[in-house]
Image (cartoon, rainbow, N blue to C red):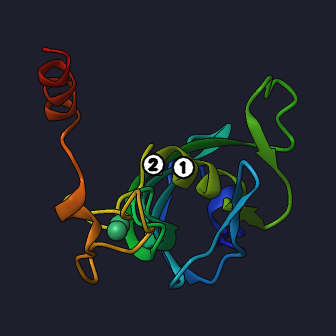
Amino acid sequence: MLQLDVARLKRSPGDTASFDLLEDLPPLELSGEVISFAAPVNARLSALNTGKTIAVTGEVGGKLELKCGRCLGTFIYDFAVPFEENYAMAQDTAAGNLLSFSGDYLDVTPEVEKSIYLALPMKALCSEECRGLCPVCGKNLNEDACGCAAEEIDPRLGILKDLLKKE
Ligand SMILES: [Zn+2]
Ligand SMILES: [Zn+2]
């Protein structure tokens, strides 16, 4: 868990505190798929006591194990995402729909996970040049070429061949 010790900060409005945390987080789950972290998550955050809230800003970085959408291989994805959240102190009854916390520790884990979700690529690729799997034999073309490509016929040429046959 990524927790900020705000015991002192919450008693001194106008003050700020800096945090540099390194924590192992459990795997993320995204539409049934489990995504593991390949390294501890690093959160470099600054917290400001605004009088009513603790405003937390900074950056969260780490490494995830993603599956390539083309070759289905696992690769390490480095991420660095901005973080910005406002937490109402529990005494504040007018908190409305703000996140709130009580006690001396502010747990930012759920919001950190949310920031990471939002930063995940729509289509994960191990590399822009990933050659993917051969549609015929299923071989990973990044590792080695297979014999299929040579026999494959360009669909446009196929149509031309059919046309020629008709004449
Ligand atoms: Zn790939
Ligand atoms: Zn093949």
- Residue 27: x and y, percent? 69, 72
Q: Residue furthest front?
A: 167
Residue at the image position 72 percent from the left and 69 percent from the top: 7
Q: In which quarter of the image is residue 157?
A: top left
- Viewer-proximal residue among 140 and 116: 140
Tag 2: amino acid: Ala
**Residue 163 appears left or right of 9:** left
CB of residue at label 2: within 8 Å of ligand 1? no
Cβ atoms at labels 2 and 1 below 8 Å apart: yes
Instruction: State which quarter of the image contains the N terminus.
Output: bottom right
Q: Rounded to the nearest whole Å, what is the CA distance between mark 2 and mark 1?
A: 6 Å
- SS for callout 1: helix
Q: Where does label 2 land, which residue?
A: 119
**Residue 23 appears left or right of 152:** right
Assess disc 1: are there few (<14), some (14-19) or many (≥20) residues with their C-alpha within 10 Å of its C-alpha: some
Is there any visible trace of residue 130 in the rendered image?
no
Q: In which quarter of the image is residue 25?
A: bottom right
Tag 1: amino acid: Ser
Q: How many labels does the image show?
A: 2
Q: Where does label 1 land, which residue?
A: 115
Assess disc 2: are there few (<14), some (14-19) or many (≥20) residues with their C-alpha within 10 Å of its C-alpha: few
Compared with residue 83, is residue 5 higher up or lower down, i.e. above or below? below
**Residue 156 appears left or right of 18:** left
Q: Quadrant of residue 61?
A: bottom left
- Residue 164: x and y, percent? 11, 22
Residue at the image position 57 percent from the left and 50 percent from the top: 117
Q: Which mark is residue 125?
A: none
Residue at the image position 40 percent from the left and 55 percent from the top: 81
- Viewer-proximal residue among 55 and 69: 69
Q: Which residue lies furthest to the top in this view?
A: 167
Instruction: State which quarter of the image contains the C terminus.
Output: top left
